[in-house]
Amino acid sequence: MYLMELGVNIRPDDIRTFLGSELPGLSAYDYEIAVAGEGTDLTTLPLESSPPTDVLLKERDVVEEELQNKGHEDDSPIKNSPEIQNKTVFIYQTHSWESYLPLLRDAKVPDDAISNDNRVNVVALGSRLSNKLNEQGIGTEHDQTNMTEELNKRQWKSTKSYSMSGAIIEANANKNGKLEYYIDIHRDSSRRDITTKTLNGKDYAKLFFVVGKGNEKYEKKPTVCKKLNTELEKRYPGISRGIFLKPNSMGNGVYNQNISEKAILIEVGGVDNNFEELDRSIDAFSEVFSDVYWKENKAKEVNG
């Protein structure tokens, strides 16, 4: 039976393998669930949207009150903080335009959750995560490239965004040979009922990890994701939607994860999540990542 599955890519227990190439739209179910989080099944798989460049260039007004309520200066680089010499973590955002409906004026549907304002898109989450890791003594570099602008300069479609971010991380890897962890921050297009978890009376934006099967060494990739996912679930039960595998049929398939066995693609919340929920989840992830990071580095020291 295993040889049949391997040879013809058919699994008797999964109807998608019989029909995936025959029914329009069913390829969206090519996700494989490596680790299922709370509520994760075929009806709650991640949703992706790749808007054309002209849509990405159309700006929406920011809900400035949200920024004022948040006190968003908290995510600016930490002033007077000691410089950490060894930078080992690189944070970037391949789809830097991904934003959230509550932060944009008159934004109603998932495709409206787009902004090139780094105060309200996933770059803001990268800034917060970078600060949190630096506070824990983990040297972190944060790239804040406006990917819409760079794609437009080259007259590239949004589908070429991973080629762009790949060049960015390769340039930084060549410049800094100590980089080991690469964290690409995204936002899912699913709605609030799927992307939000209440813990101790507080709402969190749910997280999940994506591993690209187009990378020939993808089997090793889930290792660090599984560690992080396990720790997240221990401390914040239900905050993770799990770990998903994506083949080439769903787009890029590699997601820059060929750069390192510790390259991570994490999706933070969905289009309906707000700053409070997003920040709580970034803080939870930074806490867990820091602990895993230092445990791994202490193990390295012990092993010489």
Image: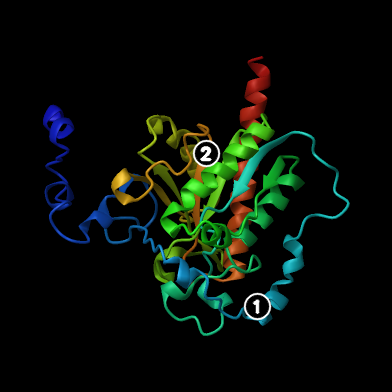
- Alpha carbon separation for disc pair 2 and 1: 32 Å
Identify the secondary structure beneath mark 1: helix
Q: Is residue 233 visible?
A: no
In the image, what residue type sits under mark 1? Glu
**Residue that extends furthest to the front in the rendered view of this protein:** 154
Q: Is residue 2 above or below residue 64?
A: above
Q: Is residue 196 above or below residue 237?
A: below
Q: Specify the quadrant that holds the N terminus.
A: top left
The residue closer to the viewer here, 194 or 3, is 3
Q: Is residue 220 visible?
A: yes
Residue sitting at 79 percent across and 39 percent down? 84
The residue at which mark 1 appears reads as 66
Q: Earlier in the sequence, mark 2 or mark 1?
A: 1
**Location of residue 59 in the rendering, given as x and y in whole percent from the top left corner:** 56, 76
Dot 2, crowdedness within 10 Å: few (<14), some or many (≥20)? Answer: many
In the image, what residue type sits under mark 2? Ala
The quarter holding residue 105 reads bottom right
Dot 1, crowdedness within 10 Å: few (<14), some or many (≥20)? Answer: some
**Location of residue 297 in the rendering, given as x and y in whole percent from the top left corner:** 65, 28
**Residue that extends furthest to the top in the rendered view of this protein:** 304
Q: Which mark is residue 263?
A: 2
Residue sitting at 40 percent across and 62 percent down? 50
Locate residue 234 relative to residue 296 in the image: left or right.
left
